[in-house]
Structure formats: C-alpha cells, structure tokens
Image (spheres, rainbow, N blue to C red):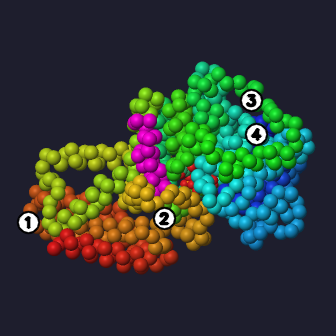
Amino acid sequence: MVANTVLSVMAYNYPAEKISVYLSDDGGSDLTFYALLEASRFSKQWLPFCNKFRVEPRSPEAYFRTASSQPLDLSHDHDHDQWTFTKKLYEDMKRRIEKTTKVGQISEAIRKEHKGFHEWDFVSSRRDHQTILQILIDGRDPKAVDIEGQPLPTLVYLAREKRPQYNHNFKAGALNSLIRVSSRISNAPVILNVDCDMYSNNSESVRDALCFFLDEERGHEVAFVQFPQAFENLTKNDIYSNSLRCIMEVELRGLDAHGGPCYIGTGCFHRRESLSGKKYKDANKALDWKGKNDKGKAEEISAEALEETSKFLASCTYEENTEWGKEMGLIYGCLVEDVLTGLVIQCRGWRSVYCCPERKAFLGAAPTTLLQTLVQHKRWAEGDLQILLSRYCPLTYGYQKIPIRLQLSYFLYLLWPLNCLPSLYYIIVPSLCLLKGISLFPQMSDIWVVPFFSVFFGNRAFSLGELLIYGGTCQEWLNDQRMWLFKRTTSFFFSLLDNILRLLGFTKLAFTITAKVVDDDVSERYEQELTEFGTDSPMFTILSTLAMLNAMGFIWGLKRSVLSEQSLFLNPFSLQAILCGLLVFINLPIYQATFLRKDKGRMPTSVTYRSIMFTIVACSIALY
Ligand SMILES: O=c1ccn([C@@H]2O[C@H](COP(=O)(O)OP(=O)(O)O[C@H]3O[C@H](CO)[C@@H](O)[C@H](O)[C@H]3O)[C@@H](O)[C@H]2O)c(=O)[nH]1
Ligand SMILES: [Mn+2]
C-alpha cells in the first residue's frame, strides 16, 4: 500500500526535479523501509512508463487492476513489450514485498543492499528508537535518473525519534517533523499531505493546486487547497455511509463559499509559510517564489552529511520550549488536528480553496466494518467537541477574524457529539412512556402535528434529495439514516463521555488508528452489504439494547393504539407508536443479526444476553 502511495505521488505530471517525496513511518519498521527501497528502484521504470503511456491512475496497483489487459492503442510491438515488462516488474516487486512482510523480517541478503538497514541494529522497539533518516533518491545527484536519463524526484524515509517518556502527538507530531526535515532538504514552497492509505488518482492535481496558489489576483491569500476525500472500497449502497457524500459534495462546497473549506487531513496542498505560523500579512512580503525554489545551502553537501545534520530536527527534544504545535506547524492536543490547524490558519487571515476536479484527485481506503466506522467517528466527534470546549472555539477565537458564516459552518461538525442527547431522548423516552402509558405527543388530529410533521419529513426529504442529486441511491440514503442513528447513540455518546472524563482529568488522549486489514470472510460480508457485528463491544451492547427497547415500545404501542376503541387519529399514542415503528424499521439489521443470522458477523450472544438483561431492567422500571 505504502509503495503505491509513494509511486503515485512521485509520478505527478510535473518536473520531477521539483518534487520531493517524504515518507513518515511512525511504526518505525524496517519492512516499510524495505518497501520504500523497492519503490525507489521501480520508480526508474514506472515514471517514464507513466509519461509515455499517459497512465492514469499512477498507482501501479490501481492501474494494473483496472487495465489488466493491455490498452488497445499501443502502436508498436515494442510498446507491447514494454507494457508487459513493466507489469511483470511490478508484480515481481509486489511478490517480494509480500513475501518479506509474511516472513516478518529482512533477510541478510536484502540487508546488504542498503546501508539504511543498519539503523535497525539500534532499534529496541517501535516505541523506543533513534531518528532514522535516509535519503533514498537524492534528486540533486546527477546519477539519480530513470531508465531514460530523466531526473527522479527526491525520496526520503523518516522515522522520527520515539522514546516512551515523550508525548509524540500522533499524526500532528509526525507532520511537524516532516515539515522541519523537508525544510532542510528541499524546502519547496508548497507541501502536499497524503495519508498512507490513499494514492493520487489524478496526475494533474499538482498543476490544479498551483493554479490557485499562483493566481495573479488572489493567489497570495491562499493558504491551502483542499481536495475532497474519496474512497475506492465502498460497496454499492455504501452500507456504513463512509463515502461522506453529503460532506464532500455539499457541505465543504458551502464552507468554500463562506471563506474556505476546513483542512481535512489528507489530499491537501499547503503553502509552507502558512504552516510555519506566519500571519497572512507578514508572509506576503516574503513571497519570493523563485528564490525559495533552489535548494539553497543544501546544494553543496552530500546526502549522508545532510542526513546526519538534519536528524536532530526529528528528535524528541527538538520541540521543547518552541512554538511548534502551539503557533507553528500543526497544532497539538486535538484528535482532529487537521480541522483545528485549518481553523487557526484561517484565523490568521489566510483563505483556503476547495478543489473538486471531475477526475478524483485522491482515492483512499474507508473502514470496512461497522465497529471501525463507529470508532473512527468517535475519534472525530471527540476532537470536534474538544475544539468547541477549547480556547479555539470558532465563535470566540474566530471573532472578527473569519466571517461569521464560516464560524457557524464549523458548528456543523463541532456539535456532532451533543447531538447524542436529543437522539437518545427520542429513542428511549417515547418507548418507555408507551410501556407506562404516558402520552408525549399530540393526537394526529391536532393542529400541532403539522409543524412536527413538516419539520421531520421536510428534513428527511431534503437529505434524500441531496443524496440523489449527487449520485446516491435510495438504499444508500436508508443506510445513511441508519448510520446517523448508530453514530449518535454510540460514537457521539462515547465521545461526549470521554470529553467529560478528560476535562475531569481521568483520561488522556488516544488516537485509535483506523484499521485497514480485515479477514477474508469479513470482507466478503462487506461486499454483500451484511452489517458486521461479530465482536463484543460496548457500542454494540448499546445498539442492541436500544433496538430491543424500541421493539418492546412498538409492540406495546400497537396494543395501545390499534387495539383501542379510538381511531388512529384520535388516539394519543399513535404518533409515539409510529416513531417506534420507524426506529424498529431502521434497526432491522440488528434484529436480523441477533435472531436470524448464523455467520461469524452475527451479534455475539454475550451482547444479546446483556442487552436483554438491560431491556428487562429498563422495562420493569418503566412498568412498575
Ligand atoms: O500516531 C499517528 C497516528 C496516525 N498517523 C497517520 O495519520 C493518518 C491518518 O490515520 P488513519 O488511521 O488513516 O485515520 P483516518 O480516520 O482514516 O483519518 C482521517 O481523520 C484524521 C483525523 O482524525 C485525519 O488526520 C486524516 O487525514 C483523515 O483521513 C495515517 O496516514 C497515519 O499513518 C501517524 O502518522 N501517526
Ligand atoms: Mn485513513
């Protein structure tokens, strides 16, 4: 995966000598280093190949998967041979990397191939090691050329120093190390940041982004150009609502109109100055692109010397008593460091741009199980609420710095966690009250039902329309509704709890990396759009308990409204029963997973027992 990410960005349609690619390996693994070494060798074939055949996308894996047979327009036999040869080279490389990964360690023969492997003699664990900095391709070196003699981009491997006693600040810390190290080695004025689970899908993106930065009238105001996140592993009806279709297609465009999209962590081009803490006004004077572009003082010294002298920039102690993480680079202490950093940059007077070219600029891997999605959203929601409660709250921090429209737009996300409270209320209370016989809503014949209905159905119809316009399906909309429900009762609820615990001083931040590898039978169920439970998690206990509660409420509701003498319109319980009915309908996959399914992804019996117990307790309290 990493090799493909790297190759895809090395192969941008842009002069290679102006591109430098840095890989940050927070896992500090020699296997990753090995994969990068293989990629650096293969790039000598791959880059000219991409140019010649106008390859798209430029991740070899993705390209050869879609173009598994040769393109038809190859004119010469020679071209055919080159195409087949490159494909074979790629497959050989892939096989070697997979074999080594399976064995789990680097063989002696490979270790001899590069001096960099010796660094791992001193690595005691992935949480405790020195800085490892290796320049695999030195773009300044006249010998660093591809098979056609054209220059190659610089390629650098970095595993920053890790020590157990230091706080590493997760991704933000990794990016800040990269910013410093790259400023010594290449110091390019524009930085692209891509997650390791994505690849460039469009070789023109660099040029697209530069169009905004270099715009004669307004380019100098632009701090970052954000591309939407898109995923290649979604199912037909996007069962876990991972496409974030509405956010990417509607909301971020809206933010763009209000002063600029937020920074969403990946697929984003930054102006280096905006990341180094400069205010827009100050930076403006220093905007001398040509002068910055040459490699400056690094020109004379050798790659080894450059490695040695740049290492300290990625050490644990470098940031002590500096503004890094506070005013400079990405801001620390927040689980959505990206959104926070984007907000701070905008408040310094810069603007940002949202760029959605027809051909997707980046494609990534979305979570493939329900639990992964819920955990990911818990992390996001937790970070969002953190911003809301911190001194960076857009309303106060952004006051008179960014337009009020933009301040309010941020609340769209920052209020996610608090959303769990009304949702839980509407899920729990009406059901319990049905059991007890308390009527909450007016009768259907009452005039007050009109505003209630129009808000509820108007809102749902609107979201359905939005989704359909942007290419979704009705089933996808239904899945989306279900995921909203699930996220609100679990992810958002837990993120709220965790925030409270953190404010009370009980817990520390933990970044749970979104898992990427799953078993074959799990991915098979994902393809079939079967909701995956299968593990015993408190999140599932909540979902299952609520589903049972709603079912009880619905049964009682039917009894109270249908079996009574009053007509549906006059019965005080009918609205409550309808609400429970809707919830039961949306929860159908849960009942199915609990009572009908036999596969490994069904609801674990432990969860079922526990939730039956909770439901009985809740019902008895309500009834007596
Ligand atoms: O200690 C860490 C943790 C994460 N990462 C990197 O951060 C990226 C994102 O992590 P991932 O597990 O893929 O999380 P996602 O939930 O997919 O990330 C989304 O949400 C994050 C904010 O929580 C953003 O930073 C990401 O860009 C966005 O894709 C990956 O490239 C990781 O390698 C680190 O370098 N060091
Ligand atoms: Mn990711």
Decide which of tag 1 and tag 2 comes sooner along the chain: 2
Look at the numbered disc 4 and give the secondary structure of its residue.
helix
Residue 489: image location, x then y, percent: 37, 60
Q: Amino acid at mark 1?
A: Glu
Look at the numbered disc 1 and give the secondary structure of its residue.
loop
Tags 2 and 4 in contact by the CB under 8 Å rule? Answer: no
Tags 3 and 2 in contact by the CB under 8 Å rule? Answer: no
Per the image, the residue denoted by label 1 is 565
Look at the numbered disc 2 and give the secondary structure of its residue.
helix
Q: Nearer the viewer, mark 3 or mark 1?
A: 3
Q: Nearer the viewer, mark 1 or mark 4?
A: 4
Q: Amino acid at mark 4?
A: Arg
Decide which of tag 3 and tag 1 comes sooner along the chain: 3
| Label placed on residue 371 | 2
For the record, the magenta segment spans: 378-397
Q: Nearer the viewer, mark 3 or mark 2?
A: 3
- Closest to the observer, 4 or 89: 4
Tags 4 and 3 in contact by the CB under 8 Å rule? Answer: no
| Label placed on residue 292 | 3
Residue at 26% over, 75% down: 617
From the viewer's perspective, tell me whether residue 355 is left or right of residue 449: right
Q: Nearer the viewer, mark 1 or mark 2?
A: 2
CA–CA distance between discs 3 and 2? 46 Å
- Closest to the observer, 391 or 116: 391
Q: Amino acid at mark 2?
A: Leu
Per the image, the residue denoted by label 4 is 184
Q: Amino acid at mark 3?
A: Lys
CA–CA distance between discs 2 and 4? 41 Å
